[in-house]
Amino acid sequence: MDFISIQRLISDERTEGKNLGIGHGILESGGWRGDPGLGPQETVALEKQKLAEEKRKKLQTFNNSRLRLESLADLEKLVRQRKEKRLKRRVPPRAPDPPLQLQPPSQLQPVDLETFLKAAVENQELLIDKYLADGGDPDAHDMFHRTALHWASLKGHSQIVDKLLEAGATVDARDMLDRTALFWACRGGHLDVLKQLLNQGANVNAQDKIWSSPLHVAVRTGHCDCLEHLIACGAQIDIQDKEGDTALHEAVRHGRYKAMKMLLLYGAKLGVRNAGAMTPVQLARDWQRSIQETLRAYVGHPRTRC
């Protein structure tokens, strides 16, 4: 009899717990929330009231923290405060590096050939001075016969070019392709170096192994200022290379419109034929015809948008 009463008591408690529902609280991860004596509507209303109160307090705190700009003095105060904040956040200026103490050439280590040529590329005048002061050969070259004058001309280091020429460097020294420093200056587009070399007697009409001249190189690289100065210094405007191409042929082939116009203004001939019996005009027509044929070949191609 006692056993039945205990079971009934347990089952009645479970049923009562199920029927209580939300009025006895909401089960969350942290336990039961809500007042067991309130119904569902009263609980929801209480939650809304709490949220509204928290929102009002946050808004009041925000309003209290804001500066009220009611006068010009308030605005000046705000600007001053922000300026002070920026000054506090600013990183203190870095102490300047101590000045670099350059060693005089007499205190430097002896400079070998490789370092000498590299110094001409990187514009390291002290190493150049040391090499020359120790009696180094200004015409010393690498395995491709490229001298320091070649490299300095290519890179546009005019002061090193001056030092080398004053030390007796051969202005028309040739590399393995028979190109002088004038070729390299045109290739780099350094007009100031070009003038230095020509003033020292560089051959303006020198030709390399394929009979190209500095004029050809200036046109290929598109350095029209160098091109104009070469013409002004007596360059043969219609000189031909091994393929019979003049500078005008090169201008047409490489699409150098400005160089082409300059050559024509200075009197370049249109009737000179190259080894393929092509004049600059025929070369231009052939070039245009090749473009037209290429475009026509792709008309109707699935990858071509029409």
Image (spheres, helix red, strand yellow):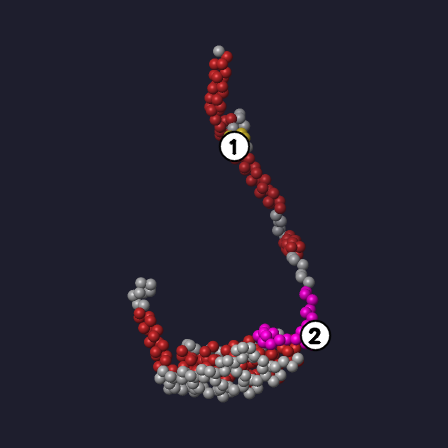
* Of 5 and 60, the residue lying toward us: 5
Q: Marks 1 and 2, how far apart in space? A: 83 Å
Residue bounds of the magenta highlight: 96-123
Q: Residue at x 54, y 28 (%)?
A: 35
Residue at far front of view: 143
Q: Residue at x 54, y 37 (%)?
A: 51
Is residue 106 one of those drawn in magenta? Answer: yes
Q: Is residue 230 left or right of residue 293?
A: right
Q: Which residue is mark 1?
A: 28
Helix, strand or loop for disc 2: helix
Give how far across and how far down residue 240 sits, in percent: 43, 85
Give how far across and how far down residue 258 sits, in percent: 44, 79
Residue 173 visible, this angle: yes
Residue 232 visible, this angle: no
Q: Which amino acid is tagged 2?
A: Gln
* Of 99 and 275, the residue lying toward us: 275
Q: Which mark is residue 107?
A: 2
Give how far across and how far down residue 18 sits, in percent: 47, 24
Mark 1 closeness class: few <14, some 14–19, many ≥20 residues within 10 Å: few
Q: Is residue 73 above or below residue 203?
A: above
**How many labels sit on residues?**
2
